[in-house]
Image (cartoon, rainbow, N blue to C red):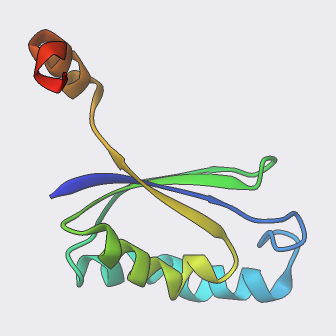
Amino acid sequence: MGLYGIYGSHTTEACPLNNAETRKLVLEHGPKIVKEASKLNIKIINQYHSGLEHTFLWVVEANDAHLIQSFFATNVGKNNALKIVPLITYSDVIEQCKNYNISKYL
């Protein structure tokens, strides 16, 4: 499975704390999203939010970024701009640095 970051943002006006319609969506779908994602083999590892910035980062594992796109477009993507980014862990970076050989790319 691949590791992905889902970066999202919304306007102040669309914030669930400020918008009754968005708040309703969060309250209806939020508690179920981890279970619904797991049905599609998307594992939501963590969900981080910055209320004052109106941004968030969710970390997920999945086999396919397109599957993530399809799933999130039908719920969180309704009121947020999303970016899906492949991730590696910092320990992976360290290992890649140990094995890095620029000549293989030239």
Residue 56 in the image: state x and y as whole percent. Answer: 61, 53
Question: Horizontally, is 63 left or right of 52 in the view?
Answer: left
The N terminus, quarter of image: bottom left
Q: Residue at x 21, y 23 (%)?
A: 91
> Which quadrant holds residue 94?
top left
Give x and y (percent) for residue 51. Answer: 75, 52
Please indicate, yes or no, whether residue 27 appears anywhere in the rendered image. Answer: yes
Judging depth in this view, the residue of 78 and 19 nearest the camera is: 78
Q: Nearer the viewer, residue 43 or 99?
A: 99
Q: Is residue 100 visible?
A: no
| Quadrant, the C terminus | top left
Residue projecting furthest to the top: 98
- Residue at the (33%, 75%) spot, across then down: 66
Residue at 54% x, 84% y is 75
Q: Position of residue 70 (x, y in %)?
A: 40, 83
Front-most of 17 and 6? 6
44 sits to left or right of 82? left
Residue extending farthest to the front is 106
Q: Residue at x 29, y 25 (%)?
A: 90
**Where, by quadrant of the figure, is residue 34 drawn?**
bottom left
